[in-house]
Amino acid sequence: MKLDHICIRVKNLEESIIFYKQAFDCTEEKIQDFPEYGFTLVFLSFPNSEVTLELTYNHDYQEYELGNGYGHIGMKVNKIQDLYKKHQSLGIKLTEIKNFGGASDYYFVTDPDGYKIEIIAE
């Protein structure tokens, strides 16, 4: 068994696609539009990963509440400082790089819908 994909619901599909392409060099793998059901799915792949991100856009839905159950998506990277500088240059909302109790360096970015993504040094 292996993890196949992660799904998040987004308010602005184009804005979210641009964010993930710029921030993480994602590529669009597949778009599935279901106008008769009022939603569109976009599947993005991350470099060097088999897990895809499914962006679900419900055409007539106005806003989602993240609730108190969602935590974050975690991503490991080889060059955390380089990615951090890239995220800074793109004006992405992010925290400072931290180290907690001797664990790997990490920081968080926030996507356009408020989803948190933890970036962890490998």
Image: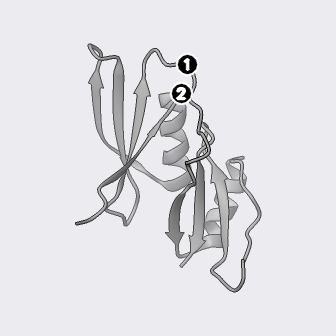
Q: Earlier in the sequence, mark 2 or mark 1?
A: 2
Q: Reply above or below: 40 against 45.
A: above
Residue 34: quadrant of the picture: top left
The reply to whether dot 2 and dot 1 touch (C-beta < 8 Å) is yes
Q: Position of residue 19 (x, y in %)?
A: 55, 42
Residue at image location 30% in from the left, 15% down from the top: 35
Residue at image location 27% in from the left, 65% down from the top: 2
Q: How many marks?
A: 2
Query: Which quadrant is home to the N terminus?
Result: bottom left
Q: Reply above or below: 110 against 41.
A: below
Q: Position of residue 41 (x, y in %)?
A: 34, 33
Q: Nearer the viewer, residue 27 or 98?
A: 98
What SS does tag 1 mark? loop
Q: Reply above or below: 59 against 17.
A: above
Q: Residue furthest front?
A: 68
What is the image's colouring?
one colour
Q: Is residue 5 left or right of residue 76?
A: left
